Image: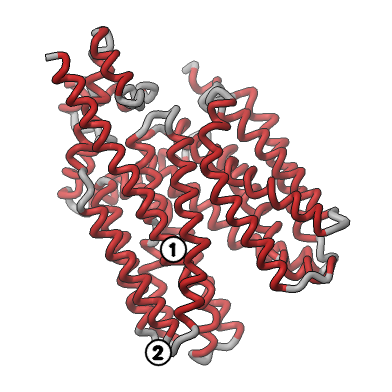
């Protein structure tokens, strides 16, 4: 009997591990396909006869749509479930890239960007799914690995896209290849062992209720310490209560999410609105503001990097490209450092976020004041690592504070905040470059210092999970 219980728990953990590994593959292929297209878009829209102004307006369409759709789609994934929302995003993104492959006019080009702008949130939903599957202690490690896999795809994609472009009709071939990649991802997501994932989630809750049994505790330890996942989440703990489950309020579990897809559209919209309102009215403004400040600071660092290297050090674009590739590769590999660094800090995410933000601020300053290329190389080396750790930290804190029942909404809201930074950063960079090539990173230093100051003020008011202590006492 006991051996059967251990065997069942082990099988559940294996099912969860398979899903996590498949999600890594989905993240890699996602950014691999997208990065094949991104460098070619501006050239293609100009080849269609667009003026620089029209090209700029068309290019901003995607960012504006992402800004408004990120939170909505993320919240929708909380309501109807990760499986169906992820499949919808992948299939409609494939449609968009397929239309892009047939774009012979500016109007068709804009039309192709609409479904991509509205539904290209597959990575956010993947992150929300990963947060559903693992415990809080495992989450930074898993998120770091996912970011690393995605970043590797983003590095390799332009190489393949550039090769395809050298042939006749290369842009169209790249677009159809990207669409095919998203269809393959959709097929992979469809074939994932979702039932085993559900069993694992149910095992989590039932294990929490039977934690008194010593032998079951030993079994749980043998399954990579994964069966106590989410034991710190009060919402998930409440879901195990029969009265709570009977009330129909347990929208966080995988089963309820899948069933809720059958609800009328107006009820889904109502649920989405309530989740967005919950996040908007929460006391998370400090985390979102830190995210915005650091997003703009990091974008300012990269905004005129090639031009600044040429003006400051007479560096050729080819050498600058090597430097950017070196930094990007380090950023991808840094994802594997997130787990060990988090363990080194004892899962104290507020302290880790503060230190990574301070290091990022210092490195931007060193880049802005660098007297030689070697100092730029040094700052770029550690900058890639600090920003990778910082992004994972702030996402983890948002999930800890908001709770796993709204992980899609929270990650979507974070992406919307980052999208605001993408809109503001080019404007601020252009203004700062009027004064000096070092203007954008210098402005980035100021914004990063503001983020550090905000964290120094707010962290003493948080507990170890980033939740405001004052609110927690009520």
Left or right placement of residue 180 versus residue 241 in this view: right
Q: Please tell me which residue is depicted at 84% across the width and 66% down the height of the picture.
A: 313
In the rendered view of the protein, which quadrant contains the N terminus? top left
Gap between marks 2 and 1 measured at Cα: 24 Å
Q: Please tell me which residue is depicted at 81% across the width and 52% down the height of the picture.
A: 375
**Between residues 92 and 148, which one lies in front from this camera angle?**
148
Secondary structure under tag 1 reads helix
* Residue 170 shows in the view: yes
Q: Quadrant of residue 246?
A: top left
Task: Name the outermost residue toward the left.
Answer: 1
Image vertical order of residue 11 relative to residue 71, above or below:
above
| Residue on which disc 2 sits | 104
Query: Which mark's residue is nearer the viewer, 2 or 1?
Result: 1
Q: In the image, residue 131 lies at what x, y percent?
A: 38, 38
Image vertical order of residue 306 relative to residue 105, above or below:
above
Q: In the image, residue 63 lies at what x, y percent?
A: 50, 65
* Residue 272 shows in the view: no
Image vertical order of residue 321 relative to residue 129, above or below:
below
Q: Please tell me which residue is depicted at 59% across the width and 37% down the height of the picture.
A: 286
**Between residues 98 and 374, which one lies in front from this camera angle?**
374
- Count of numbered badges drawn on the protein: 2
Q: Which mark is residue 273?
A: none
| First reached walking from the N terminus: tag 2 or tag 1 | 1
- Classed neighbour count for the residue bearing mark 2: other residues with Cα under 10 Å, few (<14), some (14–19), many (≥20): some
Secondary structure under tag 2 reads loop
Left or right placement of residue 336 versus residue 26 in this view: right
| Residue on which disc 1 sits | 32
Left or right placement of residue 379 versus residue 412 in this view: right
Image vertical order of residue 366 relative to residue 116, above or below:
above
């Amino acid at each position: 009997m006991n051996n059967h219980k251990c065997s069942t728990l082990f099988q559940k953990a294996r099912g969860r591990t398979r899903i996590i590994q498949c999600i890594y593959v989905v993240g890699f292929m996602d950014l691999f396909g997208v990065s094949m297209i991104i460098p070619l878009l501006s050239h293609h829209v100009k080849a269609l006869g667009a003026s620089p102004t029209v090209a700029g307006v068309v290019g901003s369409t995607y960012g504006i749509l992402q800004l408004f759709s990120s939170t909505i789609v993320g919240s929708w994934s909380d309501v109807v479930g990760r499986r169906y929302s992820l499949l919808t995003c992948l299939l409609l993104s494939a449609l968009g890239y397929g239309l892009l492959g047939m774009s012979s006019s500016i109007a068709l080009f804009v039309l192709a960007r609409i479904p991509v702008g509205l539904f290209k949130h597959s990575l956010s939903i993947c992150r929300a799914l990963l947060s559903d599957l693992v415990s809080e202690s495992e989450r930074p490690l898993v998120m770091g690995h996912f970011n690393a896999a995605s970043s590797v795809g983003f590095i390799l994609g332009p190489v393949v896209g550039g090769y395809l472009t050298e042939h006749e009709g290369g842009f169209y071939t790249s677009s159809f290849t990207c669409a095919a990649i998203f269809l393959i991802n959709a097929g992979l997501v469809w074939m994932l062992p979702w039932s085993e994932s559900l069993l694992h989630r149910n095992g989590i809750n039932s294990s929490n209720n039977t934690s008194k049994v010593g032998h079951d505790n030993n079994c749980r330890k043998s399954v990579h310490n994964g069966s106590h996942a989410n034991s710190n989440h009060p919402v998930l703990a409440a879901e195990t209560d029969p009265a709570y489950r009977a009330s129909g309020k347990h929208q966080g579990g995988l089963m309820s999410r899948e069933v809720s897809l059958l609800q009328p559209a107006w009820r889904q919209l109502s649920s989405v609105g309530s989740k967005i309102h919950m996040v908007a009215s929460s006391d998370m403004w400090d985390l979102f503001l830190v995210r915005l400040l650091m997003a703009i600071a990091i974008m300012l660092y990269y905004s005129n990097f090639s031009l600044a290297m040429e003006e400051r050090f007479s560096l050729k674009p080819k050498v600058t490209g090597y430097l950017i590739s070196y930094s990007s590769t380090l950023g991808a590999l840094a994802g594997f450092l997130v787990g060990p660094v988090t363990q080194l800090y004892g899962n104290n995410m507020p302290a880790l976020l503060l230190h990574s933000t301070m290091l990022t601020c210092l490195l931007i300053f060193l880049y802005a004041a660098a007297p030689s290329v070697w100092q730029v190389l040094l700052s770029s080396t550690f900058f890639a690592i600090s920003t990778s750790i910082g992004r994972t930290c702030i996402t983890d804190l948002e999930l800890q504070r908001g709770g796993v029942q709204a992980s899609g909404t929270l990650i979507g809201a974070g992406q919307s905040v980052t999208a605001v930074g993408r809109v503001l950063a080019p404007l601020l960079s252009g203004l700062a470059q009027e004064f000096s090539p070092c203007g954008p990173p210098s402005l980035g230093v100021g914004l990063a210092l503001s983020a550090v100051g905000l964290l120094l003020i707010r962290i003493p008011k948080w507990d170890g999970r980033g939740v405001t202590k004052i609110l927690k006492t009520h």
